[in-house]
Image (cartoon, helix red, strand yellow):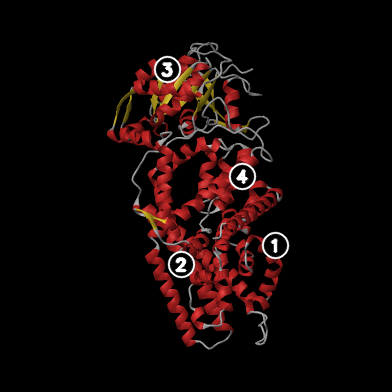
Amino acid sequence: MTSIPLVALVGNPNAGKSALFNALTGARQKIGNYPGVTVERHAGRLALPDGRPVELIDLPGAYSLDPSSPDEEVTRDVVTGAQAGERLPDALVVVVDAANLENHLRFTLQLIALGLPVVVALNMVDLARRDGLEIDPVALARELGVPVVPTVAVRRRGIAELKDAIGGKVTGANLREIQAGRGDGDEFDFTLDARRARAIARRAIVSETPARKFNQRIDAVALHPFFGPLLLAGLLFVMFQAVFAWSEAPMGWIEAAQGWLTSGADGTLADGYFKSFLIDGVINGVGSVLVFLPQILILFFFILLLEATGYMTRAAFLMDRLMARFGLSGSSFIPLLSSFACAIPGIMATRTIADPKDRLTTILIAPLMTCSARLPVYAIIIAAFIPNNSIGPGIGLQGVVLFALYIAGIVGAMGAAFVLRRTVAKGSSASFIMEMPKYQLPMLRDLVLGLWQRAWIFLKRAGTIIFVTTIALWALLSFPQAPEDSPLSQTEYSIAGRVADGLHVVMAPIGFNEEISLALIPAMAAREVAVSALATTYSIDESDEVQAEQSLTQQLQSRWTLPTALAFLAWFVFAPQCLSTIAVTRRETNSWRWPGFMLLYLFVLAYLAAGATYWTAVALGL
């Protein structure tokens, strides 16, 4: 056995451990794996001021000694001497981010309680001072009962003093110098540790700027158990009201341009396939989706704004308590929130979830979050069947219905998670700890750039998958041509119409007509294609020019009943996801089993929800 002392660097993620490890060891490093796991072991040699060598290991970042990931498990096992192939460290260097003192002290207290010799490296003190936080290291050392050395690892400040402190801790055998009120075998109490960490931080902080105190005052409301959820619900409500109220003018401009193009093409082109292709397929088909660009940009403006101000992380914290009741943790919130834009990045973001059962459940429910592709579907049906009435100062009925549809998606996702966590993804939930960023004013440039990226993604989809799918549907609806004496309409006579006939047998009981049954097929490529499919179908079928020039909203009002419209909305709350989502789920789960399961359970949910809505609406005489 080697006689060189072993010292472990340990601390929360993002405390600057790796930078400190590099500053202490230089190029004298070895990288390997811990036995039986894929967690890397970083080791190096440190030379003390008196020339003695020390072996230094950089342990994975952890939030507590109650592990929630393989990385944290290795850290726990090493510092307790339970890790196979690793001896118990002779001392610990606990790295603490000075700017997040209170949060990092929780884990520090647990480590000190182990009884090993400890030195605290109060790292990134320069950034803390820049943010207006002044900490007294002497007072902190007195409170903790261990040496505290201020460091700035990336600038190699405090390294010599830290080596001196380490040298003073590895002079003898491992002694239980500090009991800190607990001995081995005692269970750690998160609430008690948090309370002690808060009290110690308060006594060690010399001064704070008004800005830091302002953050704390905002958090007192934003994270309050009662007022915090109310504030979050209010912000979301305003967001969905704005989607309708602010988009009216720009949507009118796009519709006017669409009408101008239709009139121009109708007046200059001779009747035939090319004219039908241009008007029915391109202008009315793709144009019916493009008109929703303003609403999508307004939605993302709010999402980007909340992210940039630092509020979104608070929202995740608030949701953690709610999600725990359904078997999830707050770590699922960010992937699910990303799914409001699109399920694909949301599913990919689940890689940050350490617990495999939590991750699988989050992947399976991510498509229930109301992605931006659903917005055109919701908006066209709401505009056609929900009166644009005011139900209070600044509150429109259409915005309330849209808000309710988003809430229905969230409730559906939580209900699905509740069932999944008790059946196919059964297991205990992992703990969840996150650090709160500072509140800050958003940068206008970042907001504009973010909106441009979302607009470009939407326009790219409109020019690629939506365009190709709509044109393919136009071709299937246009051929073969119905004879003049045929009792069938062109849609009924076409290839697409005959395919829809078969599906309509299944969909008719829940109130869907043949046009809806037809639109559901291309909507599997992208949900918003349902809108362009309906527009193309009605445009091809309409022989009367006056009727043909009616907007899709007017077409729906004249052809659909209210129960059918409500059932259509209910279908899209749970609608089976697009093909791209299925492909990403296959890649992330490395199996076709879970994409197949996802497709089946979402289809069953959508069918039952649409059917229940339709049957209830008919029974009520709507």
Name the front one of labels 3 and 2: 2
Give the answer, above or below, for where 569 lies relative to 37: below
Amino acid of disc 3? Leu
Report if the CB atoms under discs 2 and 4 are less than 8 Å apart.
Answer: no
**Placement of the N terminus among the 4 image quadrants:** top right
| Residue at image location 57% in from the left, 22% down from the top | 79
| Mark 3 neighbour density, 10 Å: few (under 14) some (14–19) many (20 or more) | some
Residue 108 in view in this figure = no
Residue 337 rendering spot, x and y as whole percentages:
50, 47
Name the N-terminal-most of marks 4 and 3. Answer: 3
At numbered mark 4, what does the secondary structure look like: helix, strand or loop? helix
Residue 102 location in percent, x, y? 41, 27
Determine the residue positioned at 45% across, 41% down: 315
Q: Which residue is mark 2?
A: 291
Q: What is the three-letter code of the residue carrying label 1?
A: Val
- Look at label 2 and name its amino acid: Val
Q: Are marks 1 and 4 in contact (CB under 8 Å)?
A: no
Q: Earlier in the sequence, mark 2 or mark 4?
A: 2
Task: Identify the residue at image location x=51%, y=79%.
Answer: 547
Q: Mark 3 = which residue? A: 144
- The foreground one among 45 and 503 is 503
Residue 50 position in % (x across, y down): 46, 17
**Mark toward the viewer: 1 or 2:** 1
The crowding category of the residue bearing disc 1, from other C-alpha atoms within 10 Å (few below 14, some 14 to 19, many at least 20), is few
Position of 488 relative to 193 (above/below):
below
Q: Residue 188 in the image: x percent, y percent?
A: 53, 20
Q: What residue is disc 1 on?
A: 506
Kindly report the distance in space between the C-alpha atoms of the residues bearing marks 3 and 1.
69 Å
The residue labelled by disc 4 is: 416
How many marks are shown on the rendered structure? 4
Q: Quadrant of residue 36?
A: top right
Q: Earlier in the sequence, mark 1 or mark 4?
A: 4
